[in-house]
Image: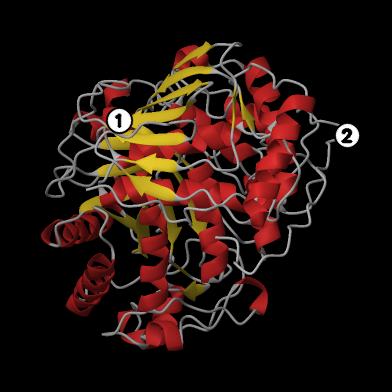
Amino acid sequence: MARAPLSPEEPDAATLARAAEQTAGTLLAPAAPHRLAVVPAPQQVQPDPTADWVLPADAVIVSSADPAALAVAEQLAQLLRPATGYPLPVTDATTPEPAGGIALVLDDSAGLGAESYSADLGAEGYRLDIGAEGYRLDIATDGVRVTAATAAGLFYGVQTLRQLLPAAIESPSPVTERWALPGGAITDAPRFPYRGAMLDVARHFFAVEDVLRVVDHLARYKLNHLHLHLTDDQGWRIAVDSWPKLTTVGGTTEVGGGPGGHYTKADYQRIVSYAAAHHITVVPEIDLPGHTNSALVAYPELAPDKIAPPPYTGTEVGFSYVDPADERTYDFVADVLGEVAALTPGPLLHIGGDEAFKVKGEVYTGFVERVQRIVADLGKTVVGWHQLAPAAHLDGRVLQWWGTNGEDPTTVDAVRRGARLIVSPGNHAYLDMKYAPDTPIGHDWAGLIDVRKAYDWDPGTHVADVPAEAVLGVEAPLWTESVTSLADIELLLLPRLPAIAELGWSTRATHNWADFRDRLAGQGPRWTTAGITFHRAPEIPWPTAPTIPTQRNMPQTDTATP
């Protein structure tokens, strides 16, 4: 049964004033451009210059009754209310119709987007289905309709709708604006099922609120995985009840000698829940057998010589490792991975495996094979950096490739044995690389990565002799040796993150640098309005004099604005 809209039946003075203002804006403002230009580029776009729609002050958002669809409808309302000042009540219906407002429609038979991507990736019930993420957005004079087979598809349709509104929609307070959408239809679905970014919270620790802000950035550009690098030499960031000193001792340091920090289990669950609400799966990484100095400081019995090393706050790699010959090490691994897996509803568990320079040959592969089995026994799918490739294959294993040369016979052999790839080339996708020599933070060991270099490559063909069907998708890692604040994170993410997002979402046929740079330029005023830090890359034609909408003083009433 449909619920009543969550608003009074009779409009109050504030609503009437907003309606009058909206009518005046509709009559006096120039028509919106008819370019359905968004990032990532949609599969199919059919503009209709005769079908522009203007959001009315009394608009209602009507959703299918499914709770997940209603949650997306409420998210849409929360996106639109601050800048518009409109109530935008949310209701449900068996057959949602726009009726001058916005309808979100779940339709299992919609057949939207690409065909399903199906793969046995080890974890029970883990199915990657890019068709399920597709949506259709129809904009006409009588309202807006988003149709999808799943709530995830509706969510991605909402992100497109958001970008088509004026940049002022990102304002945290009401502004005077003509809230117009250009008429037409968009049919869309992703190219790859895995589209992600990584945040290193080990080299420098970041508060929960900072991580949630990163989730918002990923969601805006239809990325669906957040990889958290939770442990490294400089700090251990996730509470483990069975080994409490990992955080009370190992979590108190970071690069440069700062205080470090860690996430309680409640903190981590808050991140996971917030990400899930934005259709993002968290992929936790416990880096093994190397990058473990913080664990050895806390528990020296894990060290090969059983002596606690000093805390490390530098940036070198490859010197630390847990003892692969001691059974106590595997008890530690099983306990830690077990507790992290229990907190993580997503199917993927990342075990690192990179830069273990002092654990060589069969000792290394033997360690990896035991840890892979521990992950499988927990019901999770193992992910690791591509250095895991020589180890025996385990059903569903995923390798994250971060090389800088597309020729990699060892990884190709692992793929032939059944491994799948997440592609993160260091010289294209590593967002801790500097844009230019004068970028104030970041590295350059993999070269400089300007926006064009982040955009001009193809995840499906980048690693030679790996077939496209073995590529799950793309991820953009951000290592934080030189990153100390949310502003630093945003400076390195933006505007390159949307470039990586487009490679993961959009079909190769849409790849066009000249078109992308123009669409990306339109994101600048949105970030500015939202108070988001970004690098004004010189190769992007950013608007030189963005219009700042007039702040509105809302009429005083006895009833608070919803």
Label 2 amino acid?
Ala
Q: Which label is found at residue 545?
A: 2
Look at the image and tell me in which quarter the C terminus lies.
Answer: bottom right
- Disc 1 marks which residue? 130
Label 1 amino acid?
Ile
Q: Is residue 558 left or right of residue 30?
A: left
Q: Nearer the viewer, residue 98 or 210?
A: 98
Quarter of the view holding residue 37: top right
How many discs appear? Answer: 2
Q: Is residue 200 visible?
A: yes
Q: Nearer the viewer, residue 557 or 250?
A: 557
Using the image, determine if residue 179 lies above or below residue 18.
above
How packed is label 2: few (under 14 Cα within 10 Å), some, or many (20 or more)?
Answer: few
Give residue 532's position: percent from left, percent from top.
69, 51
Using the image, determine if residue 489 lies above or below residue 73.
below
Quarter of the view holding residue 188: top left
Give residue 320's position: percent from left, percent from top.
43, 69
Give residue 454's position: percent from left, percent from top.
60, 32
Q: Nearer the viewer, residue 160 or 190?
A: 160
First in sequence, mark 1 or 2: give its number: 1
Using the image, determine if residue 374 lies above or below residue 532.
below
Label 2 near label 1: C-beta < 8 Å? no
Q: Which label is found at residue 61?
A: none
> What secondary structure is found at the residue carrying circle 2?
loop
Q: CA distance from mark 1 to mark 2?
A: 39 Å
Q: Is residue 496 left or right of residue 555?
A: left
Q: Is residue 202 left or right of residue 529?
A: left
Q: Nearer the viewer, residue 32 or 345?
A: 32
Residue placed at 71% from the left, 52% from the top?
174
Residue lying farthest right? Answer: 545
